[in-house]
Image (cartoon, rainbow, N blue to C red):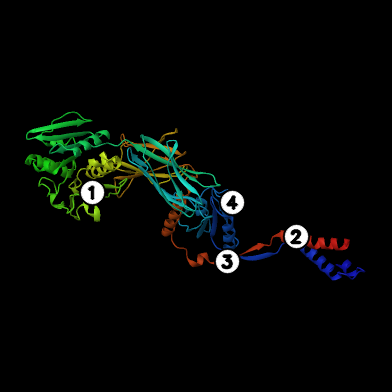
Amino acid sequence: MVLAWRRPQQRQRGVRVLASAVAAGALWLTAFPPMRHLPTTQAEAVVLTEGYSPDTLRQLLRQLGAGPPVWSYGATTSAKARPLASLLTLAEQRPPLHRLHLLGHGLAAADLPLLHHIPVRLHPGPKFSGFQTAYWSAKLPLGETLLLEGTIAAPGADTWVVLRADGAGRDSLRLPIRGGPFRLRYQPKTTGLARYELLLRRPGQATLAEPVPVEITAPVLPAVLLLAAAPSFEFRFLKNHLAEAHYPVALRTSVSRGLVQTDFVNQPVQSLDRLTPSLLSRYAVLIADAATLAVLSSSETQALQTAVHDGRLGLITLAEATPLPRTIPARTDFRVQPRATPAVPQLLHWPTIPAEARALLPAHIQPNLSLHTLITGPQRVVAAASRRVGLGAVVVSAVPETFRWALQGQQAVYASFWNQLLTAAVPPAPASATWRAGTRWPRPHQPLTLHLAGNFPETTPVVTPLAGGPAVRLALRQDTRLPEWSTGQYWPSAPGWHEVRGPERMAYRFYVYPTGAWSGPLLQESQQAIAAHNAVVPKASPTSAAPITVSQTWPAECFFGLFLLAAGYLWLEEKL
């Protein structure tokens, strides 16, 4: 500064003096930076999870100020965040945390109890694009159609969603630019454990493939007894249809007075002359026309009504345009009324109808609060309905000549119609122990709660990975409120199918999804779990989260940069 003041040249003398002072002061402040007081929020922390946005982190730190620690839990990050090995570390902080900020996809529902009573605030990452929701039946009887539906968020233009099964695409749908719901169908051909795929194809992006595990089971088909008052195409086609579907079926047709014709398929020959308790115990469903039921003897009527009331038999009656006979259980609730125009085929509807179906409808059933509607006709008139009678069910149908659908090539409509009636009439299965998984999306190295509904087993159930691995005995804890409920916790170590054996010969299979699969539904599950967690934790007092100030040094890089600018000017001005 003295040399700059005494220099002979007066040009820029004052600027050189100032630059010399700045260089000396900046060098001093680089070695001894001053302190500054910054606002911060007391007892708060930030945890980075997979899928977080760095912009969201910077904005949050500016809002919270200096002081809150930043942790990284399962996220690959280059930020100055400390790795968090266990969430118990956060619960053990002293002073205790009053709020936790989660950035990214959040935590799994099973991890939230480790935070104890710490309120959580989720800061989601960028807008999600892909499968947002997905629903399908994890267990499906052979012969039924797998229905897979869900929603997709922001897929982009010219996007297709494809269901791939058995080595080929089975169903597909083109989505609009904004995304939306989708519904795909496929009918499995064989039984066993299947792993289908749901593909999302977007131009310019890699195909997104998500696993769709389904257990295809062999259905236990009920034995069906058919009683016809006279030979007819209706019962002949129905017998052939049930026989092709591998139902045990028997047909008794009255040819003349005292003369009957019998036919047996998939079961041994036996006497069908009279409806006795012994005969009815061999069948699960009885299908008869109203004329046959009208001529039953008192002993046959008593045996029929007792079997239905005890839940051992379901009854399907093919009604005519006349009142039902007195031998039908709960006949007073089924009031059959003739229609004015029976000669015109009517459009019918039921929930699982695969195509348009028209049939003659000479009569309809008067609506009743005790009836459950199965088939509807024009103007929502009731064409078929069911009613619970004791532990069993009675079904009445006013739709005649359904065999015409089979003659016209509408096999799917014909099968769906009778499946609708048989499902409503089959007696409920006897109560047995059942398993269910506590979450829809199990993951490796995440706790999975398995629920057992039934008597507490005498031997410990065993969980085995079907792809190979050690078998683990599942320790059960009985519910103190309901002794029929028990729970056990299992930690899967690898993705794939797993099986629970017990109690006795019972087997339950569930699928563990790979890490990273179905991130959209998991994100929604995490958000719902966080909302439920915050609903039960105590609210923090306003004083506990009051802003305070902390002392922090200024960055030395700023002062060193200022020193370089001042020294550089002094050197350059002297050269010029």
The numbered disc on residue 548 is 3
- Quote the CA–CA distance across marks 4 and 1: 74 Å
Q: Does residue 86 appear to the left or right of 195 in the view shown?
A: right
The residue under label 4 is 82
Residue 162 drawn at (x, y percent) = 45, 44
Earlier sequence position, callout 1 versus callout 3: 1
- Nearer to us of marks 3 and 4 is 4
Density class for disc 2 (Cα within 10 Å; few <14, some 14-19, many ≥20) is some
In this rendering, the answer to whether 340 lies above or below 170 is below
Front disc: 2 or 1: 1
Quarter of the image for residue 412 reads top left
Q: Is residue 381 placed above or below 289 in the rendered structure?
A: below
The numbered disc on residue 561 is 2
Observer-nearest of 487 and 505: 505
For marks 2 and 4 on the same chain, the one whose residue lies earlier in the sequence: 4
> Marks 3/2: CA distance?
31 Å
Q: Position of residue 40 (x, y in %)?
A: 58, 64
Is the Cβ of the residue at disc 3 closer than 8 Å to that at disc 4? no
- Using residue 404 as the reference point, say whether residue 83 is left or right of it: right
Mark 1 Cα shell of 10 Å, populated few (<14), some (14-19), many (≥20): few
Mark 2 to mark 1: distance in Å?
91 Å
Q: Quadrant of residue 263?
A: top left
Mark 3 → mark 4, Cα distance in angstroms: 23 Å
Q: What is the three-letter code of the residue carrying label 4?
A: Arg
Rendered view: 285 above or below 376: above
Q: Please say if the residues under marks 4 and 1 sit with CB atoms less than 8 Å apart.
A: no
Asked whether 387 or 453 is in front, the reply is 387
Q: Nearer the viewer, residue 52 or 567?
A: 52
At numbered mark 1, what does the secondary structure look like: helix, strand or loop?
loop
Depth check, mark 2 against mark 4: the one in front is 2
| Residue 160 in picture, x, y percent from top left | 47, 47
